[in-house]
Amino acid sequence: MVQYTQETYLYDPNVLLKLDFHRSPAKFQPFISAANPGESWLRVRPLKDTDYDRGFLQLLSQLTNVGNITRTQFLTRFSQMKASGDYYVTVIEDTRKGEIIGAASLIIERKFIHNCAVRGRLEDVVVNDTYRGKQLGKLIVVTVSLLAEYLGCYKMSLDCKDKLIKFYESLGYVLIPGNSNSMTIRYDEDTPTLKRNSTSAATGAAGDAYQTVVVIMPFKSTFIK
Ligand code: 16G
């Protein structure tokens, strides 16, 4: 384990304490929030530069292919995200073990439309499946969804597998009739140059189709200019 003299958050952790979980249509039983996640040993917080040593990447590998990322690569990407100010990678830590057990990212996209609005994208949602029954999937998604609203996004959207539509619907996301398609073109991940040698539309296996689900924010703030 590497010893750090100082740790850096990706974004200000205090913002998470300002979120009003009563605004979410999600039903928490019992009621929990980012500030009070239900167990004294659970902590909802922004990603830290030290989370390389807390199993963050191993957790992401429960979602998709992560690759062998070195500490330097991780820290470089972390710095780029922090400098941009538009990445809100949020995690749940089991502080007893110093291990990241849940994660979700809000990415802010800056637009010209809607009076130079900002929109949110919900990405890379994953919860360690050995922590089932603690509402942590709901907790991490609601946290970043409320964060998107707090930051002034006019909408937040996500791509998910069909089997997850019910879950996201219970948190306020809707399939917009006539406008719920997610289309993808996949590029060769092994080609590190801009010149790609393979471009093919991803069709996915039957029953594995992706849907776009959107939540429209009930109010707008002007937090992000
Ligand atoms: C899902 C995730 C997306 C992630 C992708 C990885 C959510 C809401 N959606 O679509 O964020 O990046 O899976 O799959 O978490 P890929 O490796 O096929 O891109």
Image (cartoon, grey):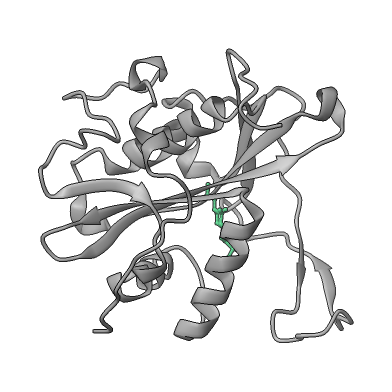
Q: Position of residue 89 (x, y in %)?
A: 48, 52
Residue 130 horizontal/vertical position (percent)? 20, 58
Please report the residue visible at 19 percent of the width from the left and 65 percent of the height from the top.
98
Residue visible at 50% across and 67% down? 64
Task: Specify the quarter for ligand 1.
Answer: bottom right
Residue found farthest to the front: 5
Occupied quadrant, residue 96: bottom left
Camera-side residue of 131 and 219: 219
For the residue pair 151 and 25, the one nearer the viewer reads as 151
Residue plotted at (36% across, 66% down): 59
Against 77, is 2 above or below? below
Rendering quarter of residue 177: top right
Q: Camera-side residue: 110 or 179?
A: 110
Residue 11 x/y as whole percent: 48, 49
Which image quarter holds the C terminus?
top right
Q: Position of residue 160 (x, y in %)?
A: 55, 46
Residue 186 can be seen, yes or no: yes
* Side of 142 relative to 107 (left or right): left
36 horizontally vs 165: left or right: left
**Front-most of residues 10 and 174:** 10
Report the label total. 0
Q: Quadrant of the N terminus?
A: bottom left
Looking at the image, residue 20 sits to the left or right of residue 209; the answer is: left
Up-down relation of residue 211 to residue 55 (above or below) = above
- Residue found at x 45% / y 63%: 63
Is residue 69 at all visible to an observer of this figure? no
Q: Is residue 166 above or below residue 216?
A: below
